[in-house]
Amino acid sequence: MTGYTMRDPTAETAATQRDRIPPSAALSDVTIGLLCISKERSSEFLDSVETLLTKRGLKVLRYEKPTHTKPAPENVIQDIVEHCDVVVEGLAD
C-alpha cells in the first residue's frame, strides 16, 4: 500500500484527506488510549486489554462515552487527541 486516506464518515459534503502520522517504532514509546463506548460488556473487554498491555509495561489511559447512542463528547475526544498515540475502541454486546 503506497498511500493512506482517512475518510470522515459523519455526513461529509466533501472528502477529507488527512496526512498519516508515521507509526512509532515500538509500543513502549506510545500512550495507548482505551475508549469504552458504553455498550454492554465493552468495559469488561477493555479491562482485559488493559491488563495485558500493562503487564507488558505499556502506558494506558482509559476513556468512556456516556452512551453508545451518541458520539463521544468533545472534551473526551480532545483529551484522547492530546494524550494518546494509539486508541483501541471497545465494542461488545
Image (cartoon, rainbow, N blue to C red):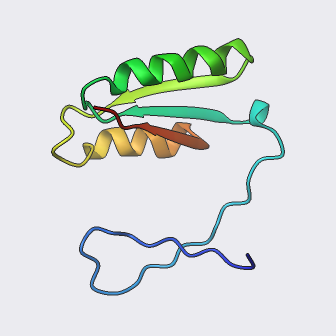
Check the image and name the residue furthest to the bottom: 14
| Horizontal side, residue 65 vs residue 70: left or right | right
| Residue 16 against residue 80 in the figure, above or below | below
| Residue 66 against residue 8 in the figure, above or below | above
Q: Quadrant of the N terminus?
A: bottom right
Q: Residue at x 43, y 23 (%)?
A: 45
Q: Residue at x 30, y 36 (%)?
A: 37
Numbered-mark total: 0
Residue 31 x, y percent position in the rendering: 63, 33
Q: Residue 5's image quarter?
A: bottom right
Frontmost residue, 51 versus 25? 51
Q: Residue at x 74, y 18 (%)?
A: 56
| Horizontal side, residue 53 vs residue 73: left or right | right
Residue 58 x, y percent position in the rendering: 70, 23
Q: Residue at x 39, y 18 (%)?
A: 44
| Horizontal side, residue 12 vs residue 89: left or right | left
Check the image and name the residue furthest to the front: 93
Q: Residue 78's image quarter?
A: top left
Check the image and name the residue furthest to the right: 25
Q: Quadrant of the C terminus?
A: top left
Q: Residue 39's image quarter?
A: top left
| Residue 16 against residue 35 in the figure, above or below | below
